[in-house]
Structures are given as structure tokens and as C-alpha cells.
Amino acid sequence: MKAEIIAVGTELLLGQIVNTNAQYLSQELAAMGIDVYYQTVVGDNASRLQGAIELASQRADILILTGGIGPTQDDLTKDALAAHVGRSLHIDRLAMDQIERFFAGRGIDMTENNRRQALVIDGSTPLPNETGLAVGLALAQEDNFYIVLPGPPKEMKPMFDQQAKPWLLQHALTDEMPIYSKMLKFAGIGESLLEDRLLDLIDGQTDPTIAPYAKEGEVTVRISTKAPTEQEAMEKLNAMQGQIQSRLADHMYASMDVPIERIIVDMMADRGITLSAAESCTGGMLMESITSIPGSATMFVGGIVCYSNEMKEKLLHVPHALLEGDDAPGAVSAEVAEVLAENVRMITDSDFGLSVTGVAGPGYSERKPVGLVYVGIAQRGQKTEVFELKLNGNRETIRVRSVKTLLYRLWQRLVSTDPATGVSKDQV
């Protein structure tokens, strides 16, 4: 079964709101074994909406429309679909009762246009709205199945899950096998290099399928398969995961869709080891990424944003001679990154201390180029490591990549460290 999602609303085209509904529906439909081939966004215009429905009905079996079913005159989704299927609209009595109770319970006079929210197409199945007022609907006609849902996600999601999904399973999905997927997460490697290492698997793929995609500082590989049972699917997915992991063991940090900071927090919390940080150019972004993870309070003891040289000296005791002077390496240097990592670890008495200092841009600093960043990792009883990064991108991109690279280096250190002794496994 092929599906198309049509999101209705001029506000989507103007960029005033983000179409998160399409992401949710695509994931849910894939889990049901329905392939989403197209996503369309159309404004509140009757002729253009009818044209979008006509095109979708020719290239998809299932059409899911979101939005445009409210009380105003520009809420045209049900009208356009009714015109397309050649049927009339009528008031659903149960939906109308709910709307009338809503206004009566609040002592508010109901305007006549609110009756539009109770409209359904003749012969369709009304989909009750448990979190709002506008009723949805489901309709089968000839070779197409139509689902109409509200636009607000807090109304759309429960209606799809509780009403539309069971209807689709009963009326549309008689022979379809569900799709099962695994998300493999990678850090410290770009999308192009990762794809190059997996090129033969990607080019020769039949089942499971492999789809890499990237976002700032990390890469995700989705492997998917269809199978009659979860056990059969997992056998195929695990076999493919094994092949991928054998080629990218130094970079694959998880087999689920989580950020690397989540893995680090869990590893350190499980081992009972603690972390602190000193940040210059990232301005607290590193600490925010860690403390956003539930459970981080058990392993993160604190940190310092030392943006100015004065704060580096006063709070983290960086020698003045390292920061200023004709022969000084400057704040953006391996020497300062090392001192920051070691001193924040000692000040907080943590097991690990992290540091980041660099030039995020847009201008040069200390006659050093934009994108030059140094990150440091100090560990109790171990030699401090400092890494020089030469990053491309704008200010925000450089800050994000600095944080992600430092987290990747920390993950590498944790993976290679014996949990019982805290010593590198290479030395054991």
C-alpha cells in the first residue's frame, strides 16, 4: 500500500508553523507496513486543494489529510474531499452534541460556524475527537482510502492512534506485513565517508534496506525490513547490524535513536564516575547537552563558562603567561585547553574534566582562523588528551560540531577504559 500525506494550511507554506504531523504520520504508517511515497503541503485554497487530492488519488492508495477542518470559512478540507468523491456533507449528531456541551459547560454562546466542525461526508466513518472539537472521518471509495484528521498535533496524534489506525487495519491492510526498523547511530565520521564504507551493502541491498542520513555532528543509518513476525524481522536486522558494526566499530555508539550524550550519561552513571566541564567558545552548550539528559545529576557535578581571559585566570587558574604576551600561545591553544580540563577536574574533584576553547567566528581572534578549536579530556590518574579541530561552517555549526566531537572523544575514552580499574584496556 502506498500513502500520501496532504497537510492543509497556508500557515505551513508561510513557515509560520512546522509540519511535525507529517513526521509522526510517516513513522506510524511505516510501522504498519504502509509506504509513504509523497508528502504535500497546500494552502487554504479550494481549487488547489482539490487538485492536490486529485493528483494524490492517482498515485497513492491511502490519502491522509491533516488540517483545515475547523470552524472558519477557510477550513476547506472536508468540502474539497466531498467534491472529489462526489458526495454531500452532513452534521454528525454525536460530534454536534460534543460541541454543544463544550460551549454550554463554559457558559459561552456558540456561534453558527462551529457547526462546521461536526461535518462528515455521507457514507464515511466519523472519527471522534477526544482532545478537541472538530470530528475527523475515514472513507473508502473504489481503490482509495481517505483519512481526514485535525491539524493541531495534540488532536491529530490521539485521533490517528485511537481511531484512524484501527480503521486502516480493518479496511485497508488485509495482506500487508509491518515494517520493522533499527536506528544505528554514529559519531566522529561524516555521512560521505560512512556511506563509502557501506557502499557495497547499500548498492546491493534488497532486504533489509539501508538508508544513511546526517544531522550536525552525527550520522544515522536506518535498516528496515518487512516480516510477518517481529522475531523474523529482528533476525534479519541483527544480521545486517552485525555487518555494519564490524566495519564501523570505532564510530557506532548506539543501536537506537539516541544522542551520544545519552550514552555517555548512562555509561558514567552506571560506573559511578563523575564529569565536569570548562567551556569558552561553546558558552555552556556542552553542559546543556549533558544536563538535558535524565539521570545526568548522578554523574555531572558542575562546570564553568570561562568566556573571557579574565575568567580563565580567576576561576580556572590559567597562568597569565599562557594567555597574553608576545610569546603566549593564547586562549585558543592546546596548552590552555589542557590546563582548563585539568583544573576544572581538580576544582570539582570529578573523575573527568572536559574543556573547549576556540574561534567560533565570524571574525578572527588572536590572529587565529575561524573554526580552530581545541578540546581537552582530563581523567583522574591518566594523561590528559587535547585534540585540535579545524571546523567549517557558521558560528552555530562550529559550536555544535565542537561539542559533538568532544563528546565522541569522551565516548571513545570510556569505551576503551576498563570499568573496574579506570585504566585504558590497551594497558591492562
Image (cartoon, helix red, strand yellow):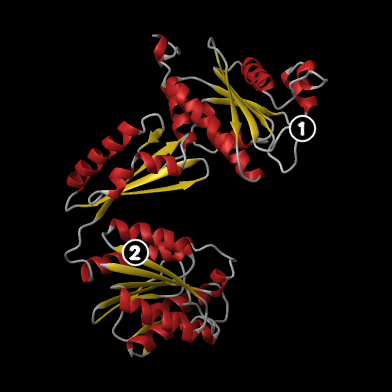
Is 205 on the left or on the right of 406, as rendered?
left
| Secondary structure found at label 1 | loop
Amino acid type at mark 2: Val
Tag 1 residue: 367
Tag 2 residue: 36
Residue 107 location, quadrant: bottom right
Is 294 on the left or on the right of 400, as rendered?
left
For residue 243, above or below residue 411: below
Is 323 on the left or on the right of 14, as rendered?
right
Residue 277 location, quadrant: top right
Q: Give how far across and how far down residue 397 sits, in percent.
A: 60, 44
Residue drawn at (36%, 70%) of the image: 4
Q: Earlier in the sequence, mark 2 or mark 1?
A: 2
Q: Measure the C-alpha gap from mark 2 to mark 1.
A: 51 Å
The residue nearer to you, when weighing 423 against 110, is 423
Q: Give how far across and how far down residue 347 sits, in percent.
A: 66, 16
Viewer-side label of 2, 1: 1
